[in-house]
Structure formats: C-alpha cells, structure tokens
Amino acid sequence: MVKRALRSIFYVCKTMVKEVNENRRDIIEMNGAMGLPCDPYHELPEFDDSFAEWGAQDAQVARKEEEDEATAPID
C-alpha cells in the first residue's frame, strides 16, 4: 500500500516536470522569436522511473507464484 502511494506521488511529480519542461521550451522559443535573451541549455531535470525495478520484482514474484500454483499437485 505504501509502495502504491509512493508510486502515485512519483508519477504526479514526473508528469508535472514534463509539463513544466514543455512550458519552458515554449517560453524559450517565444523569447527567441521576440529577440529577447534566452538560455536554451537551462532545463529542469528529466527523472527516470525509480519504481521500474520494484515493478519488475513484483511481476517476477507473481509469475513464480502462478507457476507454483500451476505445478502444485491436486489432492
């Protein structure tokens, strides 16, 4: 449950960073078109999905449990 909450918070933050970066690019383009000084190299960081490893581990455990259930002898 905690992992799910953290994942949700992470994805909200990641989405907001993408939107802010898109808006900054638009502002840089507008400043350049109007002849105003702009710094095209200053952007906010891109974040990697830090929960991908956990998701892969969870999927592996789920597959293993399904395989164990499928191979368990039926009494």
Image (cartoon, grey):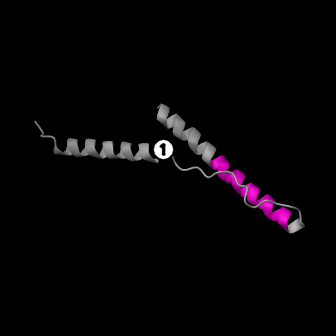
Q: What segment carries the magenta color?
A: 15-32
* 39 with respect to 6 (left or right): right
> How many labels sit on residues?
1
Camera-side residue of 22 and 68: 22
Magenta segment main secondary structure? helix
Give the x, y percent position of residue 35.
89, 66
Amino acid carrying mark 1 in the image: Phe
Residue drawn at 65 percent across, 53 percent down: 18
The question of residue 20 being in magenta is answered with yes
On screen, residue 50 above or below 39: above
In the rendered structure, does residue 3 fall within the stretch colored magenta? no
Q: Is residue 12 left or right of residue 59?
A: right
- Left or right: 56 as drawn, with respect to 24: left
The percent coordinates of residue 32 (x first, y second) are 84, 66
**Relative to the observer, which residue lies in front, 73 or 48?**
48
Q: Mark 1 — residue?
A: 51
Residue occupying image coordinates x 79% and y 64% = 29
Residue 64 screen position, x and y as percent:
26, 44
Circle 1 Cα neighbour tier, 10 Å, few/some/many (<14 / 14–19 / ≥20): some
Residue drawn at the location 63% of the way across and 43% of the way down: 13
- Quarter holding residue 75: top left
Q: Secondary structure at mark 1?
A: loop
Q: Residue furthest left?
A: 75
> Where in the figure is residue 34, as x and y percent of width and height?
89, 66
Q: Residue furthest right?
A: 35
The quadrant holding residue 10 is: top right
The quarter of the displayed image where residue 58 is located:
top left
